[in-house]
Image: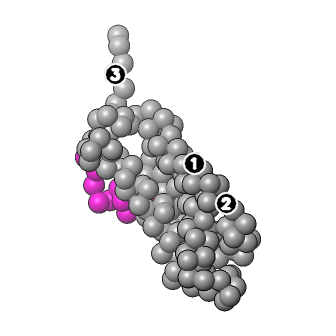
Amino acid sequence: MKFQRLRRSRRFRPADSAQQIVGGFLLAGPFVVTEEVWLLAANMSLLQALATVSIVFGIGYATLYKADTNRDATDEQNIGGIPIRFISLMCVSFGSVTILALLFDAPDTFLESTETTGEVALITFKAVSVGSVFSVVGAATADSVFSR
């Protein structure tokens, strides 16, 4: 007797995004308001920040499609070959950190007022890349645990 592996629905629902948002904001919050993250970001190079962004993409994809054996990226709805669930996950991961950083006015709180607007934007990008490492874990885990 052969057992077939149960597959989840391929449809991406608004509830899936809501789960990602809850998980993403939950783990992003503590890192956005930590001075150490902003100090780390100020001392990171652009290459390190881009490597961190790549890690976020890798963690997100691995959590959604490699750790969850019931989900297959090729079976899901996609835009240009990229699964909508993954696009949503990346938007939530980076978006939740960005929203919290701006809502809490973290750049003005943790960065010196002598820095130019461009420098503040670059450091904020780096801080968002660091915070997104944690946000993607929360968002992807919530998506995998609570999806049907």
Tell me if 40 is positioned left or right of 126 in this view. right
Tell me if 18 is positioned left or right of 107 in this view. left
Nearest to N terminus: mark 1 or mark 3:
3
Image position, residue 18 (x, y; %): 37, 63
Q: Let me know if residue 22 appears in the view.
A: no
Instruction: Please tell me the numbered disc located at residue 4.
Output: 3
Image position, residue 46 (x, y; %): 61, 60
Circle 3: is it few (<14), some (14-19), or many (20+) Cα within 10 Å?
few
| Nearest to viewer (mark 2 / mark 3) | 2
| Magenta-colored stretch includes residue 98 | no
| Separation (CA) of disc 1 from disc 2 | 15 Å
Residue sitting at x 66%, y 89%:
113
Mark 2 in CB contact with mark 3 (< 8 angstroms):
no
Tell me which amino acid carries mark 1. Answer: Ile
Q: Nearer the viewer, residue 95 or 24?
A: 95
Tell me if 98 is positioned left or right of 81 in this view. right
Q: Which residue is mark 2?
A: 45
Q: Quadrant of residue 4?
A: top left
Q: Nearer the viewer, residue 89 or 80?
A: 80
Q: Nearer the viewer, residue 97 or 23?
A: 97
Image position, residue 50 (x, y; %): 57, 54
- Kind of element beneath mark 2: loop
Q: Let me know if residue 4 appears in the view.
A: yes
Nearest to N terminus: mark 2 or mark 3:
3
Instruction: Please tell me the numbered disc located at residue 55.
Output: 1
Tell me which amino acid carries mark 3. Answer: Gln
Mark 1 in CB contact with mark 2 (< 8 angstroms):
no
